[in-house]
């Protein structure tokens, strides 16, 4: 069973963040490990508080995982602050450059999917503005794939992106930060959802079907976790991205409400509940 690490914040209503990542990874047949970067107090309507985890504790979590367990993929989500970005970036840069835990992993390459989480669906900011530059410098160059939505891609590039042609330009331009692939997600545009997947040689359009639902809390987290899992299971990026998008659509089709606000995609919709009598 492949082992996928998620580095992200905790969502108390479990529709997004590290909880959504763990559900996604397990639903796709891999084993989920976690490093928590922040704890949020949130429900389906709003984020009411955020408590960052100390950089020292984040580093200790990373050391504990990397010193013992050989990973098959990494997903990075909410980081929150420049200090957290720097702590995670410093540790991973050391690892990828042959640091203390490199030999333990026994892999020549390790897929790393970075979801640059900046704003929650409720509109609450989840990444400090001063942390954006740190993200560009410390983590984007390490990423196999980055998965920004239109607002996040716009924040990284310093301009608004409002069309498919703009998404194509943004995909190519994001590669200049050093990542190998960029997926610009177009779900916020009108019409059927189209994502743009770019690397230095190719550009792909990932087309999907729009699901008419209000149960879409945590879809970005779910997509990036699914992508990291599928890449860790051996799928090449274009095929993994297509399958991750299809998984998100399936979860949306079976989503359900748990509160008064945005509902939850059903991460385990394709799995039968365990029957203890059988």
Image (cartoon, rainbow, N blue to C red):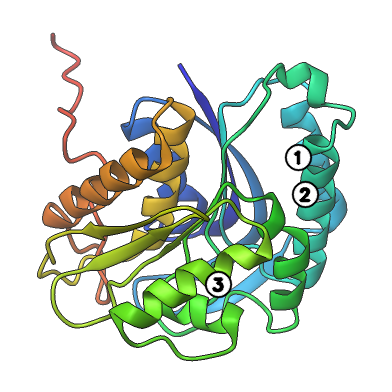
Pick the front one: 77 or 205: 205
Which marked residue is nearer to the observer: mark 1 or mark 3? 3
Which residue is identified by label 3?
A: 173
Mark 1 or mark 3: name the one nearer the start of the chain. 1
Left or right relative to 196: residue 216? left
Report if the CB atoms under discs 2 and 3 are less than 8 Å apart: no
Residue at image location 12% in from the left, 55% down from the top: 253
Q: CA distance from mark 2 to mark 3?
A: 31 Å
Figure quadrant of residue 236: top left
Pick the front one: 203 or 182: 203
Q: CA distance from mark 1 to mark 3?
A: 33 Å
Q: Which mark is residue 61?
A: 1
Image quarter where the N terminus lies is top left
Report if the CB atoms under discs 2 and 1 are less than 8 Å apart: yes
One can see residue 121 in this view:
no
Residue at image location 43% in from the left, 56% down from the top: 221
Report if the CB atoms under discs 1 and 3 are less than 8 Å apart: no
- How crowded pointer 3 is (Cα within 10 Å; few <14, some 14-19, many 20+) is rated as some
Task: Tell me if residue 17 comes above or below residue 23 in the rendering.
Answer: below
Which marked residue is nearer to the observer: mark 2 or mark 3? 3
Figure quadrant of residue 238: top left
Task: Tell me if residue 141 comes above or below residue 100 in the rendering.
Answer: below
- How crowded pointer 1 is (Cα within 10 Å; few <14, some 14-19, many 20+) is rated as some
* Spot occupied by residue 261 in the image (x, y as percentages of width and height): 27, 76
Q: Which mark is residue 244?
A: none
Image quarter where the C terminus lies is top left
State the SS at label 3: helix
Residue at image location 62% in from the left, 26% down from the top: 71
Figure quadrant of residue 229: top left
Which residue is identified by label 2?
A: 58
Mark 2 or mark 3: name the one nearer the start of the chain. 2
């Amino acid at each position: 069973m492949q082992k996928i690490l998620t580095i992200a914040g905790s969502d108390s209503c479990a529709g997004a963040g590290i909880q959504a990542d763990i559900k996604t990874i397990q639903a796709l047949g891999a084993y989920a490990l976690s490093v928590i970067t922040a704890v949020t107090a949130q429900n389906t309507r709003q984020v009411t508080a955020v408590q960052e985890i100390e950089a020292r504790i984040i580093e200790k979590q990373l050391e504990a995982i990397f010193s013992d367990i050989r990973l098959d993929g990494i997903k990075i989500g909410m980081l929150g602050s420049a200090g957290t970005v720097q702590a995670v970036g410093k540790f991973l840069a050391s690892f990828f450059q042959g640091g203390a835990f490199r030999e333990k992993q026994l892999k020549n390459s390790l897929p790393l999917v970075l979801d640059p989480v900046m704003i929650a669906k409720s509109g609450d900011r989840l990444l400090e503005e001063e942390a954006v530059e740190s993200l560009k410098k410390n983590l984007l160059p390490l990423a196999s794939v980055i998965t920004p939505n239109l607002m996040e891609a716009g924040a990284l590039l310093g301009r608004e992106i409002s069309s498919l042609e703009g998404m194509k330009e943004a995909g190519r331009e994001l590669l200049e930060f050093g990542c190998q692939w960029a997926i610009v997600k177009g779900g916020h545009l009108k019409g059927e959802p189209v994502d743009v997947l770019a690397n230095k040689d190719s550009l792909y359009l990932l087309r999907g079907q729009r699901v008419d639902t209000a149960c879409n809390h945590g879809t970005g987290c779910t997509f990036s976790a699914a992508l990291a899992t599928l890449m860790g299971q051996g799928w090449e990026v274009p095929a993994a991205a297509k399958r991750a998008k299809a998984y998100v659509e399936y979860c949306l089709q079976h989503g359900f409400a748990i509160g008064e606000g945005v509902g939850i995609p059903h991460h385990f919709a394709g799995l039968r509940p365990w029957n203890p009598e059988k």
